[in-house]
Amino acid sequence: MTTEDLKAFEDKIYAFVGREVCPPTPAKDAVNGAMIRQWAEVIGDTNPAYTDDTWAATSSRGQTIAPPAMMYVWGQEGFAVTTGRAPDAQSELVNLFNEHGYSGVLGTNVKQEYFKETSPGDTVVMAMTIDNISERKTTGRGPGYFFETLATFTNQHGEKIGTQRFKVLKFIPQEQPAAAASEETLQVPTRIASPRGHDNKWWWEACDAGKVLIQRCKNCQTLRHPPRPMCGECQSMEWDSIESTLEGEILSHTQIHHPKIPGYQYPLICAVIKLAEGTNFMANVVGCEPSDVHIGMKVKGVVEQVDEKTMLPQFYPA
Amino acid sequence: MVANVKDKAVIVGIGNTKFSKDSGVSELSLAVQAVKAAIDDAGLKPSDIDGMATFTMDTNDEIEVARALGVGELTFYGRSHYGGGAATSCLHQATMAVATGMAETVVVYRALNGRSGHRFSGGVSGDITTADAIHWGWYMPYGLLTPASWVAMFTQRWMHNTGVTKDALFEVAHSTRVYGANNPAAFFYGREFDRAEYDAARMIADPLQLFDCCQESDGGSAVIVTTPERARDLKQPGVSVRGVAQCAAENQEQMTSFYREEFAGIPEMETAAKNVYEMSGLRADDIDAAVIYDAFSPIVLWQLEAWGFCGFGESGDFVKDGALRTDGRLPTNTHGGQLSEAYIHGVNGIVEATRLVRGTSVNQPAKTVNHALVTSGVGIPTGGAILGRMD
Amino acid sequence: MSDYKTLTCADVSIGDKLPPLDIDITTGLVVCGALATRDFEPVHHNKAAAVATGLPDVFMNILTSQGLMTRFATDWSGPEAVVKSLDLRLGAPNVPGMVMTMTGEVTAIDSDNSTVDIAVVGENNIWGMHMQGSVQLALPQEA
């Protein structure tokens, strides 16, 4: 792009500064308890100010409020966005960027300020403008521009309840070799699998099929775990196996707090379990509070799929 | 059967590099710096070295260290396996080589970028393809894959069986940090530490919290072992190996010996202790100070029991009486240990035990140290040594 | 209501740490979080749409992250605290299978206005910083 072309392009984008994205528009639904409850359940927020009418009535506010972080939620367009958004100044600006190669998009900052809380029955009215556009910047993602929208929120009485500034980077994506791109598709992590060799492959294959086996010496019947090629009692190399009932008792346990390894679900409890058959076995304990796990606890195992690739015995309180 | 190599090998030189979290140099550089420091300490020349002993985990090949330093021929090189269990095993190797005449002057070294390079706390992973990986495979899928988690599993059971509480773990953690705070070479130099900070620190794998766990460090340590005859001509007072032993006990796994009838204990260290005492003709009562491998606080307690300083389950009371302090029954980890000085896989511990016998520890106890104990990492095949003044 | 306590400025010191909070990033949390915030952008509920943008799976929308941030702050402060502002810098996406650990520390106290500023970081265990920023709370005046 020549200097003149760049100037012409920048003149066009800077003309968007101050333009209205949407005029003051009341949300389709008033602030309401049903949406608040759904939000609180998913976010895991047990704040009684949001969902406990009895508590709220006696609180300094006298009533429940909407979570402040829901301020923008009320005015969301809804399911229609799955098939595209109605044109507005923001989409025009985005298209202009895209046409000039600035097709990358990255939300970088969002700042909300809250002036007044809302409660069920209030109506949130949102207006939005394009507030500012930066000069051209060189970023780690590629050259681009930051633009910032400013949303202002009022209630049905015209009182200002908050603002939101949302900053977006539009950039020219860095060239990437086509071959590398597919290899770089990131995988959802799964648990680290055991390598499989002569001495343990059969055990893990049975585990894949939902069974926990215990190796048994064919000569002296001694059970052994983990599997190994020779019986330490009689030195026989002949062996078969029995299927464990997975009934057992915890001999020791630890809850893994740090580091958290990709692919594992936390809280994560590991325990050494004495199986009813007599061999000891290390596995996870699930299905109870970590604080309930104790030495001497009776557990019962079941082989479960724990992620996309992994079958593992997991032990529950018996 | 205990072979007797009592006083047949003498530590004549010790050396550490600077300990840091980012050395900015290669592990080979750390290794040769540590070895050179030990050679200088002894008043030797690189060409005097004819043997080397290090860890299987060490990435610095003996011949690379030898070429870099200008050492000539090597007639002995031996490696010891099992992580920190190798610390005094290297001394064991060096002692055997010197006692049998396979070499005259052997350097024991260990150098690692344990913080800026590969970090043990990251755990084992499926990437390794050795036979060892089959063993770790019984634990990795469940998420039991860091040293802290393995030690935590033993600790939970041992505390359950003995009734020892976190108070004892804190005393181990605190006593080493008081020493470390007074050691300019230590990470904890000049740093305050109290029970409130200990209790507030993040849980790693319960019951182990952050300050129950050692540092991860970049650095190198080396000690030089030679014959008593040669030692008499050298710069430093000789520190004699009175006894040294290694042991892998029955049903041993690396860090996961969960398949014993009872796993709240370290039978491999009990055997090593018995053999070192037998070789040296000494008893626990004869030991004046100690460097006890402390990758994690509870393992110090188990070793106090294994070496007979107190009975099984009594180590909690033993340490709470102040035994590990500078005026206590057994001043321990006076350099700050691996909890507070640096984690050089226990070889910095051999350096400190040598200083204790020389009388040059930065936290030297007031009493005369005739004999100092130094041990290797536990939960794995392990060992220990008793050092004393050369006659 | 006596079950719920709310901190006042007198209870708080600069440098106080908030209890860390681990959030398991599940498909359920990502999809339901998007729906609960009326965010129907396909990348938050349709894996194919997310994969087309170069990510391995659906990823958490900003409004859910904002919700988690305010929850983290008010879990600590108690329910009478009023959230005054929320300022986030956005980092790596949260994708199912990850764990995000949130940590926070009190960085400023304004006793005259009875407000506290809390610096908060939400870091996932695979790609690192997901969000970083600050929450300002107004705490009740002392009784």
Image: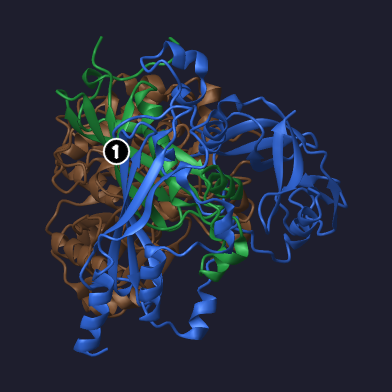
Chain colours: A blue, B brown, C green
The answer, for residue B330, to whether it is visible in the render is no
Residue A231 horizontal/vertical position (percent) = 77, 53
Dot 1: chain letter:
C
Q: Residue at x 24, y 40 (%)?
A: B336
Residue C123 horizontal/vertical position (percent) = 39, 49
In this rendering, position of residue B269 left or right of residue B39? right
Residue at the farthest bottom position: A2
Residue A313 horizontal/vertical position (percent) = 72, 45
**Image quadrant assignment for residue A91:** bottom left
Q: Could you tell me which secondary element the residue under label 1 belongs to?
A: strand
Q: Is residue B101 or residue C119 the one in the foreground?
A: C119
Residue A75 horizontal/vertical position (percent) = 46, 45
Q: Residues within 10 Å of mark 1 (few under 14, many from 20)?
A: many
Mark 1 — residue? Answer: C85
Q: Is residue A92 or residue B274 the one in the foreground?
A: A92
In this rendering, position of residue B230 left or right of residue B115? left
The answer, for residue A237, to whether it is visible in the render is yes
Number of marks present in the image shown: 1
**Image quadrant assignment for residue C109:** top left
Q: Is residue A87 above or below residue C71?
A: below
In this rendering, position of residue B97 left or right of residue A224? left
Q: Is residue A37 or residue A189 the one in the foreground?
A: A37
Q: Is residue A19 above or below residue C125?
A: below
For badge 1, the amino acid type reads Ser
Q: Is residue A165 or residue B147 the one in the foreground?
A: A165
Q: Residue at x 76, y 46 (%)?
A: A303
